[in-house]
Image (cartoon, rainbow, N blue to C red):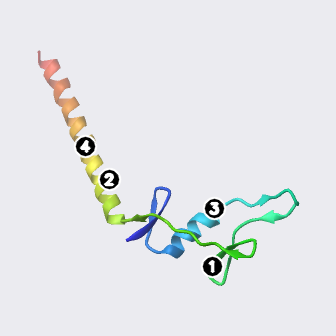
Amino acid sequence: MGYQVGFQCFDTLQEAQDYKYSSVAPVINQNNQLVQPEKLNGQWHLNGSQIVDSFPACSPLQQFQDGVEIGWGFIALTVGILCVAIMRRGL
């Protein structure tokens, strides 16, 4: 079981959190203070509070199998179109 962030599946919660929070752009709030998540002692914090979140479960193997299934669908469609094109030329 993995953790899904967007369309990516990560093996560990730490990898998922690192990916998500390291890509967050810092902002300046109305008090002219810089607000950004930061990693302290292996945990992500925002404004001094630890971030507690959850990610949907995913399976890298299942994602691979889904991709193979879609790929075979495209191959079958391409072969079908090619067969129709060849048959039309013969007539």
Q: CA distance from mark 4 to mark 3?
A: 34 Å
Q: Is residue 8 left or right of residue 85?
A: right
Label 1 environment density (alpha carbons within 10 Å; few <14, some 14–19, many ≥20): few
Query: Does the CB distance between marks 1 and 4 fall below 8 Å?
Result: no
Percent coordinates x, y for residue 46 in the rendering: 71, 70
The disc, 4 or 3, on the residue closer to the chain's N-terminal end is 3
Q: Report helix, strand or loop for mark 4.
A: helix
Q: Is residue 88 left or right of residue 74?
A: left
Q: Residue at x 32, y 53 (%)?
A: 67
Viewer-side label of 1, 4 = 1
Q: Report helix, strand or loop for mark 1.
A: strand
Q: Quadrant of the N terminus?
A: bottom left
Q: Which residue is mark 3?
A: 23
Tag shown at residue 43: 1
The disc, 3 or 1, on the residue closer to the chain's N-terminal end is 3
Q: Which residue is mark 2?
A: 67
Q: Residue at x 22, y 30 (%)?
A: 81
Percent coordinates x, y for residue 91 in the rendering: 11, 15
Figure quadrant of residue 52: bottom right
Q: Residue at x 81, y 64 (%)?
A: 34
Tag shown at residue 73: 4
